[in-house]
Amino acid sequence: MADLPPLKVYYDAACPGCRRDRMRYERWAGETGRDVVWCDLNQHHEQLREKGIDPQAALMSLHVEDAQGEIHEGMSAYIILMRRVPRLKPLAWLIGLPGINQGLRYLYDHWVRRRLKREGRLP
């Protein structure tokens, strides 16, 4: 597979599920994952603010920065990551479909709010 442009992923490293998802992604991605830089959003508040992202908003949803510096958020961020991994490409296509995308976004947002509230990290 050709070299892919680098991505920077801002994720919640304080979340055990998020850490497991990252490890699974890295395992599945193999060589295609080498150009993905994982940044714990809890340690990059200033960098997020410089990019116009509220750290609380970053906590609520996955953010990915592409090689051009454009920020992708939520399901769009997941789709960009999944498209890099051959076994996840069909899933990326599926979650990009209208209706499915919005439904998953609703479920994801609900899950994140519940998790953060349970952890005492939701104001």
Image: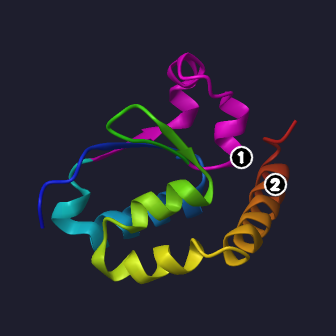
x 21%, y 53%: residue? 4
x 83%, y 41%: residue? 122
Report crowding for label 1: few under 14, some 14 to 19, many 20 or more residues within 10 A (C-alpha): many
Report crowding for label 2: few under 14, some 14 to 19, many 20 or more residues within 10 A (C-alpha): some
Instruction: Find disc 1 in the rendering and name its residue.
Output: 60
x 43%, y 83%: residue? 90
Q: Nearer the viewer, residue 23 or 81?
A: 81
Q: Where, quadrant-wise, is the N terminus in this rendering?
A: bottom left
Instruction: Find disc 2 in the rendering and name its residue.
Output: 113
Instruction: Report the span colored magenta.
Output: 36-62
Give how far across and how far down residue 59 sits, in percent.
Answer: 67, 42
Disc 2 residue type? Arg
Give how far across and how far down residue 109 sits, in percent.
Answer: 77, 59
Task: From this view, report whether residue 111 is shown above or below residue 50.
Answer: below
x 50%, y 21%: residue? 47
Q: Secondary structure at mark 2?
A: helix
Which numbered disc flags the more N-terminal residue, 1 or 2?
Answer: 1
Task: From this view, report whether residue 104 is shown above or below residue 87.
Answer: above
Disc 1 residue type? Met
Q: Where, quadrant-wise, is the C terminus in this rendering?
A: top right
Instruction: Measure the C-alpha gap from mark 1 to mark 2.
Output: 7 Å
Q: Nearer the viewer, residue 68 or 78?
A: 68
